[in-house]
Image (cartoon, rainbow, N blue to C red):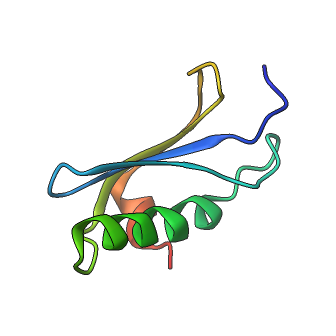
Amino acid sequence: MSSASPIFVATFADGEVTRMTTNTALDKLDVIRGVRPARAAYESRIKKTSSRIITAHFESTDGAILAEHTEDQMESAP
């Protein structure tokens, strides 16, 4: 496993996908550190308030899935 920062991949309800490098420890992945920049990137790209995140996951720089998150988990994130 790489020691580089993990990538947070978020899929929004309208099909838009963002991929954000996050500054979080590999042994304690912080969803909020992924959700906030993912929503900001969406809003910057689409020029409107982000739709809901329906799926998300952290992956390593080599593409290995580190953790997956459900829509319910994303709804509770700020």
Would you place residue 69 above or below residue 40 in this image?
above
Would you place residue 49 above or below residue 25 in this image?
below
* 29 to the left or right of 55: right
Residue 12 lies, in percent from the top left, at 26, 56
Would you place residue 5 above or below residue 13 in this image?
above
- Which quadrant of the figure has residue 13? bottom left
Residue 30 lies, in percent from the top left, at 69, 58
Residue at position x 24%, y 76% in the image: 47
Residue 51 lies, in percent from the top left, at 23, 70
* 6 to the left or right of 76: right
Which one is nearer the viewer's eye here, 57 or 16? 16
Residue at position x 79%, y 34% in the image: 4
Instruction: Residue lying at the far left in this picture: please name it.
Output: 14
Residue at position x 37%, y 61% in the image: 72
Residue 75 lies, in percent from the top left, at 38, 70
Image mark count: 0
Would you place residue 2 above or below residue 19 in this image?
above
* 12 to the left or right of 57: left
Which one is nearer the viewer's eye here, 16 or 64? 16
Q: In which quadrant is the N terminus drawn?
A: top right
Which one is nearer the viewer's eye here, 53 or 37? 37
